[in-house]
Image (cartoon, grey):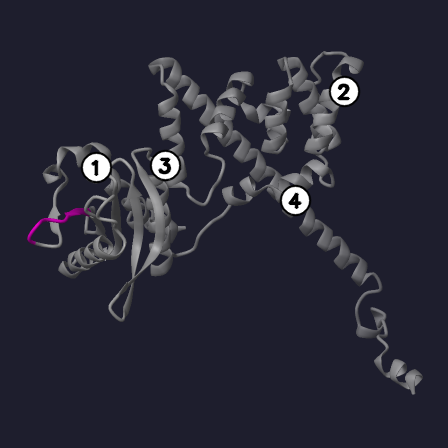
Amino acid sequence: MNEKIAAETAVVAVPAQASGLPPDFYEMVDDLKSIVRGAHVRAQLKVNTEMIRMYWEIGRTILAKQGEERWGTKVIDRIATELRTEFPGQRGFSRTNLKYMQQFARTLPEQIGQQVAGQLPWGHIQVLLDKCKTRAELDFYAAHAVRNGWSRDQLTTHIRSGLHQAHGAAAHNFDATIPLDSEATKQILKDPYRFEFTQLAGTPSERELEDALEDRMTRFLTELGCGFAFVGRQYPLRVGQSDFRVDLLFYHFKLHCFVVVELKTTKAQPAHLGQLSFYTAAVDKFVRDPEVDGPTLGILIAESKDDTVVEFGLPLQNQPLAVSTYAALPAEVQRVMPSPEELSRVANEVLHRGSREITQE
């Protein structure tokens, strides 16, 4: 019985000739698959080189400006905030990484496209910058890492062992290309920095546009350094028997109050102000602690034809919310709140220029 079942379920390899195909057909298909896979890997290596070139150019630009205008640490922090706000889906723009980019451009002042280090993953370059004491050492290890396809751990081990001393400290700028099947190549293919660098978006849906606006505004406000702390996104509120959700809720530590932010990807409507008023009053009543927290503030950011509408809401004694301009806010509030121009610029990057560029791609 078992033999019969085995005979019925056996998979028989059909020769290529039996199906009318050439005798070496499947070998040829394997060759074609190898060609495709090789092209994929080479394309990703080129993408990695472009990303490394971008890091070098960022570092060079910052160094040049620092030399001209004597920037301080605060400016670097703000650059990091601006880049992460503009490119929320791409890591690599932290203050620490920007410092590495500056060190990178300072250590290798020549065009990075002419250097073997430009073929390595960013993590390898950080190891070289951290552990190599001289430019000659860095060139030696960069060239050997490329030629031999070392992993980052292997590179670290060889630097610690002083391999360059056994081979002589002369720079080895030989024409090296990273092997496609090496550990270094595998790390490039797995590198999340490279993956995010290559991400392309299609035409954004309304929900995607809203998500992008919320992400970017949250990142901008919390990294601005003026007192915003993120409380929740789509923050749930229960009023009576009904459930509602606030787009973004923050707490401002300098003002000691909650800040409701409502974001609209459509044109501003009177109903939007009513909704902001309702949510601000609800947070004031059900979330705020009157003994500790000040009156809740509201901010409405909505699209208009040529710009972005930014309205501020401030509770008054005789009404739940007074819609106001930035100039009409109390001086102590103005000092620690971003200006309408800043909020409008961040929103515009999603609602106007950002969405058009994505669509055109």
Residue placed at 71% from the left, 27% from the top?
A: 155
Mark pair 4, 1: CA separation: 46 Å
| Residue 41's disc number | 4
| Residue 161's disc number | 2
Quadrant containing the N terminus in the rendered view: bottom right
Residue placed at 11% from the left, 37% from the top?
A: 327
The three-letter code of the residue at mark 3 reads Glu
Which residue is under mark 3? 223
Image check: 163 left or right of 262?
right
Kind of element beneath mark 1:
loop
Q: Quadrant of residue 125?
A: top right
Residue placed at 27% from the left, 45% from the top?
A: 348
Q: Which residues are magenta?
A: 309-318
Which residue is under mark 1? 339
CA neighbours of label 3 inside 10 A, class few (<14), some (14 to 19), many (20+): some
- The reply to whether the C-beta atoms of the residues labelled 1 and 3 are less than 8 Å apart is no
Tell me, yes or no, if residue 219 can be seen here: yes
Would you place residue 344 above or below residue 285 in this image? above
Coordinates of residue 14 in the picture (x, y in percent): 84, 72
The three-letter code of the residue at mark 4 reads Val
CA neighbours of label 2 inside 10 A, class few (<14), some (14 to 19), many (20+): few
